[in-house]
Each structure stands twice: as C-alpha cells, then as structure tokens.
Amino acid sequence: MTENTDGRSQNCVRDFSRERRIVKTDEFSSVFRLRPVYRTAHFVLYTRRNTLPHARLGVVAAKRLAPRAVARNTVKRVTRELFRLTPLPPIDCIVRLSKPVNTKAGPATTARLKQQLRSELTQLFSSQRLSPGA
C-alpha cells in the first residue's frame, strides 16, 4: 500500500471523486460489451479490469424501471455509498437497474426498499471484493 499526500493509504481511499467514476459514453460502452458478472433480483453488475490503481463506478437507473426521480436518486446514492466502503481491485464496475423497484402508485422510497437495495448491492460488490491478502 502506498501513502497519499494526506496520509491515507491508496487502497483505502473512501471518496467518490470524478476519477473514481465512469462518465464517458465510450467507457460505459466498453464495459457493457462484456457479459454480466453477477445478478441480483433488481441489479446486474458488469465489470472490466482497468489500468488505474483504483476501481471506478458507473450507475444506470432507467426511468422506466424507477419512474420517480427520488427512487432513481436513492438507487444511485446507496450504490455510490457501498462502492465507497467496499475495497475492490482495479476494475470498472457498472451497476444497472434491471427490474422495477416501485411504481408511481406507491411511495417513492421506503426504509424497506432502501434496506433491500442495500442488501442486493452488498452482494454485488462482495462478489468482486479485494481479498484481504492482496
């Protein structure tokens, strides 16, 4: 592990700065071309090794699967938080919402929904977790 200028180790950086995001269309496309690595009830995880010293994340939450902006933002917020807290190898991860999480008729988000999303996303990231000896 190398030290950053602020004293934190490189592998334990807990921020979500722009360099830790997948933002360009061609970067998304290059990861989407590969087969999904892991699936849960609501999510699909795509990964690809990168040449950077850290993992990067992209999140896709389509409006047709989460009709309310509050629900889409909740999905993205929970995903980013768990990504930040999970030690991952240098890979590009795209988490895509694949099944509807709620409807316009019910409440936009609930504690139960957040807990379910958190549980599924933990499973996704755990499947790619950096081993303790690495």
Image: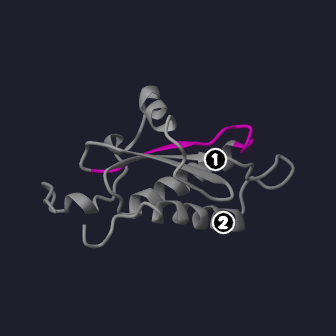
Q: Main secondary structure of the magenta part?
A: loop
Vertical placement of 67 versus 90: above or below? above
Residue 125 lies, in percent from the top left, at 47, 61
Mark 1, residues whose alpha carbon is within 10 Å: few (<14), some, or many (≥20)?
many
In the image, residue 60 lies in the stretch drawn in magenta: yes
The residue located at (35%, 63%) in the rendering is 87
Q: Secondary structure at mark 1?
A: strand
Q: Which residue is mark 2?
A: 116
Q: Which residue is mark 1?
A: 97
Q: Amino acid at mark 2?
A: Gln
Q: Farthest residue toward the front?
A: 35
Q: Which image quarter holds the N terminus? A: bottom left
Q: Quadrant of residue 61?
A: top right
Q: Quadrant of residue 51?
A: top left
The residues colored magenta run 54-68
Residue 119 vs residue 30: left or right?
Answer: right
The residue located at (71%, 68%) in the rendering is 112
The residue located at (44%, 32%) in the rendering is 30
* Mark 1 or mark 2: whose residue is earlier in sequence: 1
Residue 14 lies, in percent from the top left, at 33, 59
Residue 57 lies, in percent from the top left, at 43, 46
Residue 99 lies, in percent from the top left, at 72, 49
